[in-house]
Image (cartoon, helix red, strand yellow):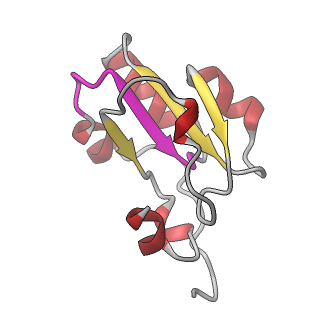
Amino acid sequence: MRDKLLPMPDSHDPELLRRIPLAAQTVLLVAPATGDLAAAYRRANPRARLVALISADADLPTLKPHFDSVLAGAVDRDAMPLDELTGRIDCIVYDGSLERMHDPLAVLRR
C-alpha cells in the first residue's frame, strides 16, 4: 500500500489521446480528474459514446458535460459497475488514475 498518492494531472496527455482508437464506439474513462481528455477525443470522434467511471468525491458538475453517461463507484475498491452499460467497451482508459489508487494491480485484475 502506498503512503502518499500522486496528484492528478492538470490536463490531458496528448500521447494518451493519440492511443485511443478513432474507430472506438464506446470509451470508458476510469476516474477522470477533468473532462479534458474526453473533450479532446470527442472532437476527434464525435460519434463515440464516452462513459466516465467516477468515485464519490469526483467533481460531477465539471465532468458530466463531457460524457454521455457517468457511473459512480469506489473505483479502486469495488468491482466496476459495468453491468449498467449496454454493448461492448472498445477502450478502457486510466488517465492518471492507476498511480493514485491504493492497489492498482488489483484493479487491473478485476
User: Measured along the vertical axis of the image, is residue 35 above or below residue 57?
Assistant: above
Residue extending farthest top: 47
Q: Say which residue appears at 44% left-offset and 61% top-offset.
A: 110
Q: In this rendering, does residue 19 appear at all?
A: yes
Residue extending farthest front: 83
Residue 104 magenta-highlighted = no
Q: Say which residue appears at 63% left-offset and 31% top-offset.
A: 70
Percent of width and height locating residue 15: 27, 46
Percent of width and height locating residue 68: 56, 19
Q: In this rendering, does residue 11 appear at all?
A: no
Residue nearer the viewer, 74 or 63: 74
Residue nearer the viewer, 54 or 11: 54
User: Measured along the vertical axis of the image, is residue 97 above or below residue 54?
Assistant: below
Percent of width and height locating residue 55: 69, 51
User: Measured along the vertical axis of the image, is residue 102 above or below residue 109?
Assistant: below
**Residue 105 falls in image quadrant:** bottom left
In the rendered structure, the answer to whether residue 55 lies left or right of residue 105 reads right
Q: Which residues are magenta?
A: 21-32
Residue 27 magenta-highlighted = yes
